[in-house]
Image (cartoon, grey):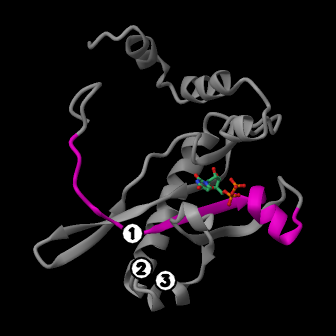
């Protein structure tokens, strides 16, 4: 971040996969395996989906990923390790403010340095791509409020920002100021 409005962006070669990490059953996992939403998973589970809206982002296995050359075995290992680090960090960050990180999606890209490509995170992390539930009440504070027509979308996103202590920047942005 250079300032409130500018970021320095590295150009990456995007890997065409969505990497989902889950701690608690919800959404498509619950539907696929008939698990009640809210059931804690025995351990964090990582899944890969092909980034292709026309095909509805189908789930893929390591076999598909390596056979079709979307990523190498080493890159799959790197993406899994990075995703688990993100999960540990975010679980702690949200846990400290009374929010359960149910699941989230991230994407990765290759940063080329001469002939060597390093896999790095290439995505935003926000309530649009995470499931965030209030730890006490299980109230949804994420995009499911929009997807499931629960209302109070802005209030919920604002509540997440407020609990994380990043609200003080928001009035400045809304007023269009640059301080
Ligand atoms: N997700 C996302 N973009 C997508 C699909 C899923 O950010 O195109 C996120 C979603 O918000 C949730 C997690 O990935 O946090 C797992 O989503 P799921 O597979 O349960 O699909 P959904 O029920 O959201 O269709």
Q: Give the residue at the far left of this rendering.
A: 114
Q: Is residue 76 magenta?
A: no
Task: Using the rendered view, name the quadrant where residue 4 is placed.
Answer: top left
Give the mark nearer the N terminus: 1 vs 2. 1
Q: Which residues are magenta?
A: 8-35
Give the mark nearer the N terminus: 3 vs 2. 3
Q: Taking 121 as reference, is 60 left or right?
A: right
The residue pinned by badge 2 equals 70
Residue nearest the viewer, comparing 78 with 60: 60
Q: Residue shown at 60%/62% (left/top)?
A: 21
Residue nearest the viewer, comparing 178 with 100: 178
Q: Residues within 10 Å of mark 1 (few under 14, many from 20)?
A: some
Q: Residues within 10 Å of mark 2 (few under 14, many from 20)?
A: some
Q: Position of residue 156 (x, y in %)?
A: 67, 27
Q: Residue shown at 24%/31% (left/top)?
A: 6
15 over 99 or under it: above or below: below
Placement of the C terminus among the 4 image quadrants: top left
5 over 126 or under it: above or below: above
Is the residue under label 2 in contact with that under label 1 (CB below 8 Å)? yes
The answer for how far apart the CA atoms under marks 3 and 2 are is 5 Å
145 over 22 or under it: above or below: above
Q: Residues within 10 Å of mark 3 (few under 14, many from 20)?
A: some
Placement of the N terminus among the 4 image quadrants: top left
Q: Position of residue 2 (x, y in %)?
A: 21, 32
Q: Position of residue 55 (x, y in %)?
A: 60, 68
156 over 144 or under it: above or below: above
Q: Look at the numbered disc 2 and give the secondary structure of its residue.
A: loop
The circle drawn on residue 65 is 3
The circle drawn on residue 15 is 1
Q: Look at the numbered disc 3 and give the secondary structure of its residue.
A: helix
């Amino acid at each position: 971040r250079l300032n409130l409005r500018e970021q320095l962006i590295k150009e990456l070669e995007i890997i065409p996969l969505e990497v989902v990490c889950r701690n608690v059953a919800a959404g498509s996992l619950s539907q696929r395996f008939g698990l009640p939403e809210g059931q804690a998973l025995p351990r964090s589970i990582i899944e890969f989906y092909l980034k292709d809206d026309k095909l509805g982002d189908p789930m893929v296995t390591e076999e598909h990923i390596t056979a079709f050359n979307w990523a190498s075995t080493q890159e799959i290992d790197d993406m899994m390790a990075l995703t688990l680090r993100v999960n540990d960090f975010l679980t702690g960050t949200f846990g400290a403010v009374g929010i359960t990180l149910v699941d989230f999606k991230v994407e990765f890209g290759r940063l080329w340095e001469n002939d060597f490509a390093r896999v790095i995170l290439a995505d935003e992390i926000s309530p649009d791509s995470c499931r965030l539930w209030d730890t006490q009440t299980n109230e949804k504070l994420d995009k499911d409020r929009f997807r499931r027509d629960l209302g109070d979308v802005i209030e919920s996103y604002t509540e997440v920002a407020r609990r994380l202590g990043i609200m003080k920047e928001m009035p400045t942005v809304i007023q269009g100021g640059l301080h």
